[in-house]
């Protein structure tokens, strides 16, 4: 890994740690030398996507706890329209944070595989010269 990537990951980890401690993105940007809050936000977002950064997991857990506390504090008034809308917004944020709304892909069926096979054959016919098709087909069969 290059030195610049190591430095970028270190800044991402620091951005996550500072965010977890309660600093705003503007404050993080100032502290870490980003041009503005959007740079700090991008660094923190990149770190959240990177499963190797332990602080991201901690921040995600902390955010869930905060969101749960917000839900609990408003739950008794959930029958009021304004409170219900607020709760739905908080719950939507929690679902986003935990990726609850992402549906797993359905497994490939035999029909899917046959359709892909036809597409591959069509591409081979279109782009592989006649004299090389047999060699190409042999290599595919080894996969």
Image (tube, rainbow, N blue to C red):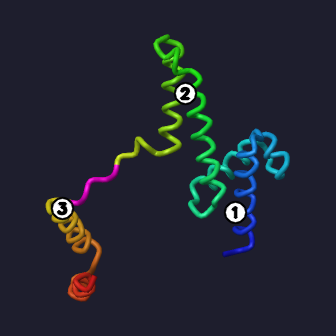
* Element type at mark 3: helix
Name the one closer to the observer, 11 or 52. Answer: 52
Determine which residue is flagged by label 2: 71
- Between circles 3 and 2, the one closer to the viewer is 2
* Element type at mark 2: helix
- Name which quarter of the figure residue 49 lies in: bottom right
Left or right: 1 in relation to 114? right
- Name which quarter of the figure residue 57 lies in: bottom right
Mark 2: few/some/many CA within 10 Å (<14, 14-19, 20+)? some
Determine which residue is flagged by label 3: 115
N-term mark: 3 or 2: 2
Q: Position of residue 108 (x, y in %)?
A: 23, 60
Classify the position of the C terminus by image quarter.
bottom left
Left or right: 31 in relation to 92? right
Mark 1: few/some/many CA within 10 Å (<14, 14-19, 20+)? some
Determine which residue is flagged by label 1: 9
Classify the position of the N terminus by image quarter.
bottom right
Mark 3: few/some/many CA within 10 Å (<14, 14-19, 20+)? few
Q: Which residue occupies 63% across, 49% down? A: 45
Q: Position of residue 65 (x, y in %)?
A: 59, 39
Separation of residues labelled 3 and 2 (CA atoms): 47 Å
């Amino acid at each position: 890994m290059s030195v610049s990537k190591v430095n970028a990951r270190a800044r991402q980890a620091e951005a996550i740690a500072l965010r977890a401690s309660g600093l705003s993105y503007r404050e993080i940007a100032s502290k870490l030398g980003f041009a503005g809050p959007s740079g700090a936000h991008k660094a923190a977002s990149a770190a959240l996507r990177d499963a190797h950064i332990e602080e991201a997991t901690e921040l995600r857990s902390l955010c869930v706890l905060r969101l749960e506390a917000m839900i609990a504090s408003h739950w008794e008034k959930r029958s009021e329209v304004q409170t219900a809308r607020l709760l739905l917004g908080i719950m939507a944020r929690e679902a986003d944070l935990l990726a609850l709304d992402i549906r797993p892909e359905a497994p490939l069926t035999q029909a899917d595989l046959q359709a892909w096979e036809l597409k591959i054959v069509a591409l081979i016919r279109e782009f592989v010269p006649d004299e090389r098709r047999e060699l190409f087909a042999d290599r595919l069969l080894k996969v």
